[in-house]
Amino acid sequence: MSESTQAGTQVKVVVPEEHMMVALLGSGDELLRTVEQSFSGDIHVRGNEITLSGPPEETSRITRLIEELLELVKNGTHVTPDVVERSLRMLEPDAESGATTRPVDVLTQNILSARGRTIRPKTLNQKRYVDAIDAHTIVFGIGPAGTGKTYLAMAKAVKALQAKQVNRIILTRPAVEAGERLGFLPGTLYEKIDPYLRPLYDALHDMLDPGSIPKLMESGTIEVAPLAYMRGRTLNDSFIILDEAQNTSPEQMKMFLTRLGFDSKIVVTGDVTQVDLPGGQASGLRTIENILEGLDDIAFCRLTSHDVVRHKLVSAIVDAYGRYDQRNTADGDSRRGRGRPRDSGAR
């Protein structure tokens, strides 16, 4: 029910069941407080009714938010303050198209059910990323730490293996800290590469029975190896993930992409703001979009600080570093500008 008042619009939302109201408000009303922080009007809860009073546009958005949260509750989604904040962001009109996104369409999309939990995208950009993996042969996931680039790609790989869409999963990343010269390190091959590949193992353990992983690796169904070991191969019937791709050279990136065989899929992930290559060497990830621009069946997906799904401080840290880099770039441009000789005109 909606009616106009001098103060704006008043809307009443009726919640059909008591347990849904409890799930909607949260423990100690923490979800209600999260909504109130994003709404300049008033919210009153009485019994199974929520009354919103405020500016029409805001009231409409919060009404839609409540309706979406109720749908999430019905679908068994555990609603948290983070879910509320992400849902609010999805309900904001897109800067280019003006369209909004239904949070329930994003947050109920199941990628993989593993070890008692379901892996789903948590933001609109994450949904676009996993949809791109379904629709394209090669996908680049580019964004800061904590945006789920590698984790979601791994979930799609495990799902493809379980569905027999591929025969094996190949996970690789450049061992930059060792300069790829692993022969100089002590220990066996696996002891040498383990520190660089450990994040990939960690994700696998989240998605598969840990006892099955050694057997799958022994049979070659799952392979985890440094990028240098990809040279000279053709990878058929495989789901291949290149992680930390910002630390590849342009030559390594070309070598890797040309390993693609029949009935295979490649996902390349990386963060162009965290290049660890020595001596100012060019990053293959930074140059690749200009090289592949216009080619069919290749997608570039960009994630931002809004897609960080770790502690909210991680998002704030990413933004702070972004501002710092912008200031340094602007200061550098300014200094270079002051250093140019003035044009004295024709002589």
Image (cartoon, rainbow, N blue to C red):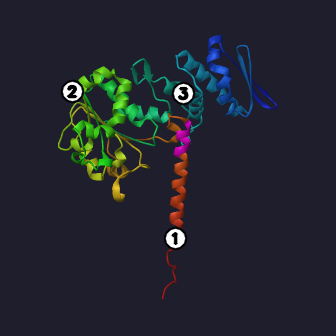
- The quarter of the picture where residue 7 lies is top right
Disc on the earlier residue, 1 or 2? 2
Q: Read off the residue under disc 2.
A: 218
Q: Read off the residue under disc 1.
A: 337
Disc on the earlier residue, 3 or 2? 3
Stretch in magenta: 312-318
The amino acid pointed to by label 2 is: Glu
Is disc 2 placed on a helix, strand or loop? helix
Q: In percent of the image, x 57 and y 30: which residue is there? A: 82
Q: Read off the residue under disc 3.
A: 103
Is disc 1 placed on a helix, strand or loop? helix
Instruction: Look at the picture and state if 94 lies above or below 114.
Output: below
Q: In percent of the image, x 55 and y 57: which residue is there? A: 327
Instruction: Look at the picture and state if 306 lies above or below 248.
Output: above
In this view, which residue lies farthest toward the left? 232
Residue 240 sits inside the magenta stretch: no
- The quarter of the picture where residue 83 lies is top right
Instruction: Look at the picture and state if 282 lies above or below 234.
Output: below
